[in-house]
Image: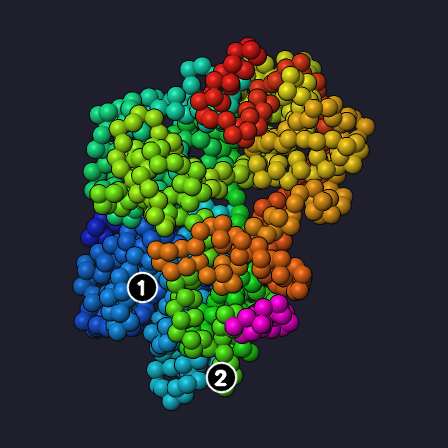
């Protein structure tokens, strides 16, 4: 039993001295670890998930060395801690070192990521620390070393932190593959050193150290498909494993910031800035506040706005996002720990489990687009057991108050999104095999069995695996005439990369995060500010002023991949926008949003009951503050058109000066609407030749034409059927062009395209043209190519969300479709029409003026 072990007694006494008592889920995990079991720990943010696994490894070590655990040094790697964020590593390392010091142990904690110096890596190679905190990319670099199997001989516990963030991404696939290698590589050492007494093979189990099984643990906060998440992680172990769930009621208080006047014709983005003054009292009443903004561009704008409306915050407010240079980001993170800062304007860069205990308030600006993301951000405040998490929701347009009400409802019902695991990512597999070939090499048959043990590649066939091998050895069917694609040699049955230049280039580009080409931004006088995407800088002329890292700077010149700037006192500046800044509504939040919208209909808020005097109708659900505030908007929507219930689909046909508008409101999110609008436009085009311009938001989409649109009760169900969906999608969008663009990322990850040496990265357009050329070559000479197939598959499953689109169309078939003909724009249609205007390359000033004029005319 755990309680009788020396390790438990020492750790529990250490906790008692600090007036702490372990939670039941922590002690349960510790018991599983000393029993050699594996599983997934699920607990709310800020409730001690890290210690549930970390202290389990410490207890296990003390139990194994009860008499000399404090004096033992250089014990080899005991705990491998995989984390998705660099910022997380430093924070976790600090907490771990504190435990080690206070227990009087000699363990060392090492950090291995992109910020780790070469000298530190060499030091770790000579004497590997007992705890190694590492990112997925650095873990693969670790596997590219010649002697990595020896470093892993003593490993006992593997922890994958923030698994809910990794699963469903190619970084998660990287982790799956690395774990499959780690769990099998000790068997490789047994084969090579059969007489080594330290290495034993337990009957029916994988090879182990001193007979002790590996213990593999995922650590996860908010995720809907917990069982599946566990199965994906533990798949290489071929064990069911356990889920340890913390039955802790983490209190979250959600407050909506409601504008004094509700716009009946709202449009996206501008309202938030108008409400900036309302959050100053919240900031001043809190110790530290995190202000989450969805995009980097808006974060820059908000930082400037807050300084304008509250100059007293100068020096006490900071900005944090991924394009700011590392030194400044680290300073901000350190200042949060030491209570130096009053507020930080940030993006997803501070989403994950960094323990900033002084943070007692979070403000979410704009819809987080998902329940899980909202809970994750709320958990940044009150980040310790027993504390209350406080989060304020600030809408960027009136209708977002509806999402605030939906979020509250979804959290009450515990409707947390799941993450779909990725399958058969051949680009990641190609990169991984080259990584192993750079290191100690691999045997094809052995590695095939290993990768089949992962969830991602459990269905890979021998033919598919052989095609990947063909790809890395001779360039596959289409590229075998070109020597640069012949990377891996086969020597005595072992696949290896022996060319030093090829090995070096591969090490430099290990990873699955492919972004647009980034340009460094430096002052002409010296000093690095951050990075900006090449496409944004390429639109500017010398003399143009833009904002980065909270400073207004003037572009002076561009040399290679560096933009040189100088400080500017100009009050007007261009706020950068980053590609991929628009998130899409999740399916869960979309469902709750439809139900919440129903509450605006009086009928849905009444229930009929039978009493002694017959039938009586009573008010069942009072309006929430958000819905109460939106009553003027709902009243106008009902007057001009209709308020759709959860079981209805609203379609509006509006004739205006600019043409005929067809507006459809599925509430399925921007990505689904993008595919659905193209599908509907194609099918209408089969009825009559017609041209459309298309715009959409998370609530619905618009087809705009210069001629009447032939949609009515007689054909609408047929137009929105899921029959022949895949074939019609392929015809309705340029799927070849979309696949070509998706292929660029796949080609970079798969090593077909070299991005360039540090400081001289290839320009994005050159990468795209290289990828386009390869795409055409494969289409013509190798149409069954795995990477080509993957590109089309990712377009359908990720970009178009084909499964979710099909589900939405099937739901619509079961719904009542209501078509209305308003005589002017409605509150629901207005933001979508404005989104369409915004795509016509109008400047922000001109757009704002035009929108104001439209609002006045409609009033």
In this orientation, which residue lies closer to the viewer: 390 or 363? 363
> In the shown orientation, is residue 711 left or right of residue 34?
right
Counting from the top left corner in percent of width and height, residue 326 is at 29, 48
Q: Which residue is mark 1?
A: 132
Magenta residues?
A: 461-483
Q: Quadrant of residue 815?
A: top right
Queried whether the magenta region covers residue 396, the answer comes back as: no
> In the shown orientation, is residue 478 left or right of residue 335?
right
Marks 1 and 2, how far apart at CA: 33 Å
**Residue displayed at 77% across by 32% down:** 689
> In the shown orientation, is residue 302 left or right of residue 585?
left
Circle 2: element type: strand
Quadrant of image for the C terminus: top right
**Residue displayed at 20% across by 65% down:** 105
Q: Quadrant of residue 9?
A: bottom left
Q: Height in image: 401 above or below 471?
A: above
Residue with the most extreme bottom position: 195
Circle 1: element type: strand
Quadrant of image for the N terminus: bottom left
Whether residue 390 is visible: no
In this orientation, which residue lies closer to the viewer: 422 or 709? 709
Counting from the top left corner in percent of width and height, residue 695 is at 60, 31
Queried whether the magenta region covers residue 473, the answer comes back as: yes
- The circle on residue 491 is 2
């Amino acid at each position: 039993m755990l309680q009788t072990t020396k390790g438990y007694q020492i750790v529990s006494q250490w906790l008692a001295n600090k007036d702490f008592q372990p939670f039941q889920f922590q002690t349960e995990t510790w018991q599983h670890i000393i029993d050699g079991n594996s599983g997934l720990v699920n607990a709310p943010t800020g409730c001690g998930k890290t210690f549930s696994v970390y202290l389990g490894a410490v207890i296990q070590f003390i139990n194994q060395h009860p008499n000399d655990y404090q004096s033992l040094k250089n014990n080899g790697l005991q705990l491998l801690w995989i984390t998705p964020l660099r910022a997380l590593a430093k924070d976790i390392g600090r907490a771990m070192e504190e435990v080690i010091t206070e227990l009087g142990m000699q363990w060392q904690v090492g950090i291995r990521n992109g910020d780790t110096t070469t000298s530190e890596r060499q030091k770790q190679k000579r004497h590997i620390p007992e705890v190694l905190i590492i990112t997925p990319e650095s873990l693969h670099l670790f596997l590219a070393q010649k002697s990595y199997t020896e470093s892993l001989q003593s490993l006992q516990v593997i922890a994958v932190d923030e698994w809910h963030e990794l699963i469903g991404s190619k970084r998660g696939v990287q982790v799956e593959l690395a774990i499959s290698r780690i769990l099998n590589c000790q068997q490789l050492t047994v084969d090579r050193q059969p007489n080594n007494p330290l290495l034993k093979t337990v009957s029916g189990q994988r090879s182990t150290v001193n007979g002790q099984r590996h213990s593999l643990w995922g650590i996860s906060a908010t995720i809907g498909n917990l069982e599946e998440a566990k199965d994906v992680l533990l798949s290489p172990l071929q064990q069911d494993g356990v889920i340890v769930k913390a039955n802790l009621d983490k209190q979250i208080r959600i407050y909506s910031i409601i504008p004094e006047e509700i716009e009946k014709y709202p449009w996206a983005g501008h309202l938030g800035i108008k409400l900036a003054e309302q959050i100053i009292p919240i900031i001043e009443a809190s110790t530290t506040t995190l202000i989450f903004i969805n995009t980097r561009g808006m974060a820059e704008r908000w930082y400037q706005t807050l300084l304008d409306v509250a100059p007293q915050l100068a020096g006490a407010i900071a900005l944090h996002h991924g394009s700011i240079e590392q030194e400044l980001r680290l300073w901000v993170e350190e200042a949060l720990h030491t209570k130096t800062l009053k507020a930080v304007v940030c993006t997803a860069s501070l989403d994950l489990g960094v323990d900033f205990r002084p943070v007692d308030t979070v403000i979410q600006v704009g819809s987080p687009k998902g329940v899980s993301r909202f809970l994750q951000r709320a958990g940044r405040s009150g980040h310790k057991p027993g504390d209350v998490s406080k989060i304020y929701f600030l809408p960027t347009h009136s209708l977002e108050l509806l999402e605030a009400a939906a979020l509250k409802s979804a959290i009450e019902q515990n409707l947390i999104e799941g993450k779909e695991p990725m399958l058969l990512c051949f680009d990641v597999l190609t990169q991984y095999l080259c990584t192993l070939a750079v290191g100690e090499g691999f045997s094809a048959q052995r590695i095939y069995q290993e990768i089949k043990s992962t969830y991602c590649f459990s269905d890979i066939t021998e033919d598919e695996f052989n095609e990947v091998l063909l790809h890395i050895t001779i360039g596959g069917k289409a590229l075998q005439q070109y020597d640069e694609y012949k990377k891996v040699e086969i020597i005595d049955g072992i696949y290896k990369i022996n060319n030093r230049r090829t090995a070096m280039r591969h090490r430099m580009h290990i990873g699955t995060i492919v972004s647009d080409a980034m340009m460094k931004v430096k002052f002409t006088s010296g000093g690095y500010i951050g990075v900006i995407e090449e496409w944004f800088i390429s639109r500017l002329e010398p003399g143009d002023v833009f904002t980065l890292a909270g400073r207004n700077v003037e572009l002076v010149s561009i040399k290679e991949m560096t933009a040189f700037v100088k400080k500017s006192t100009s009050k007007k500046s261009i706020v950068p926008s980053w590609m991929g800044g628009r998130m899409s509504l999740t399916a869960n939040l979309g469902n709750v949003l439809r139900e919440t919208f129903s509450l605006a209909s009086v009928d849905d808020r009444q229930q009929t009951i039978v009493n002694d005097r017959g039938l009586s109708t009573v008010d069942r659900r009072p309006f929430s503050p958000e819905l109460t505030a939106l009553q003027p908007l709902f009243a106008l929507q009902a007057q001009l058109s209709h308020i759709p219930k959860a079981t209805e689909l609203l379609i509006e046909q509006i004739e205006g000066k600019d043409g005929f508008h067809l507006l459809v409101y599925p509430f399925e999110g921007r990505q689904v609407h993008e595919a659905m609008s193209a599908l509907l436009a194609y099918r209408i085009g089969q009825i009559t030749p017609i041209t459309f311009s298309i715009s959409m938001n998370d609530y619905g989409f618009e087809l705009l034409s210069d001629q009447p649109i032939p949609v009515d009760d007689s054909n609408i169900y047929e137009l929105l059927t899921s029959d022949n969906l895949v074939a019609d999608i392929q015809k309705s969008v340029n799927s070849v062009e979309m696949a070509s663009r998706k292929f660029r990322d796949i080609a970079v990850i798969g090593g077909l395209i070299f991005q360039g040496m540090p400081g001289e990265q290839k320009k994005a357009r050159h990468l795209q043209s290289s990828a386009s050329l390869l795409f055409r070559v494969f289409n013509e000479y190798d149409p069954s190519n795995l990477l080509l197939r993957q590109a089309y598959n990712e377009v359908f499953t990720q970009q178009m969300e084909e499964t979710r689109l099909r589900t939405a169309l099937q739901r619509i078939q079961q719904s009542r479709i209501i078509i209305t003909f308003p005589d002017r724009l409605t509150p629901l249609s207005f933001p979508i029409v404005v989104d369409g205007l915004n795509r016509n390359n109008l400047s922000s000033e001109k757009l704002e003026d035009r929108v104001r004029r439209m609002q006045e005319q409609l009033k």
